[in-house]
Amino acid sequence: MKKICVVYFSGYGHTAKLAQALMAGARGVAGSEVHECRIDNEGQIRDADWQLLAAADAIVYGSPTYMGGPAWQFKKFADASSKPWFSQAWKNKIAAGFTNSASTNGDKYATIQYLWTLSQQHGQIWVGTGLLPSNAKAHGPEHVNWSAGFGGLMSISPSDASPDEAPRSGDLETARLFGERIAQITHQLG
């Protein structure tokens, strides 16, 4: 069994919905054991989550994009990861990342870059989406990778949409496919 941990913060529930779709995709790959490590409103994870991360073959990072970067709760977790960083505990583990915000762009890629940088400080092996964009006139939010995320998954949840309404079907399918790819690559490299 390959262990995949998804560690993320969700402020309003949209990023959590994206995480669930990603985890469903990863669980669809035989031999994958997927764990959720949700960062709480104080920027903390449980002691058991730190143990899961230590035993993981892959760690997927997720945060909404607030004001051009990750939520402070995610940053607090990232700062706390300096203990495993010091001992190189996550070195050579697979890594990937995802984000969500209300705007079409909203500087989401800055959050993906932050997640990538965190993974590189830990010596991890980054996996991008591997998905072509839906960028023709006929495409919209119901299509896969409509936001054209390559380095990581970027999702859009309009500011007046509840978690029941967004992320939309295309972003959720993108998340599912991305989770599947992360699990497949974890098996290939493991």
Image: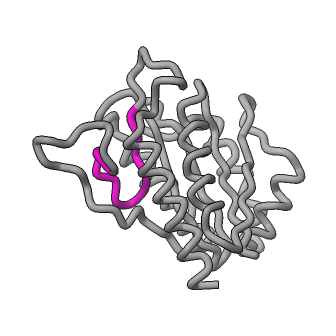
Give the quadrant of residue 89: bottom right
Which quadrant of the rendered structure holds the C terminus? bottom right
- Please, is residue 111 above or below residue 41 in the view? below
The foreground one among 17 and 81 is: 17
Question: Residue 34, position in %: x, y?
Answer: 71, 59
Q: Residue furthest bottom?
A: 189
**Residue beneath the point at 50% across and 70% down:** 126
**Residue beneath the point at 53% across and 42% down:** 18
- Please, is residue 137 above or below residue 179 in the view? above
**How would you classify the magenta stretch by its main secondary structure?**
loop
Residue 36 relative to residue 158: left or right:
right
Residue 150 falls within the magenta-colored stretch: yes
Q: Residue furthest top?
A: 160
Residue 44 relative to residue 186: left or right:
right
Residue 85 relative to residue 51: left or right:
left
Q: Which residues are magenta?
A: 145-156
The foreground one among 175 and 121 is: 175
Q: Residue furthest right?
A: 47
Residue 66 relative to residue 136: left or right:
right
Which quadrant of the rendered structure holds the N terminus? bottom right
- Please, is residue 169 above or below residue 84 in the view? above
**Residue beneath the point at 74% across and 48% down:** 37
- Please, is residue 129 above or below residue 9 in the view? below
Question: Residue 7, position in %: x, y?
Answer: 67, 50
Question: Residue 69, position in %: x, y?
Answer: 46, 40
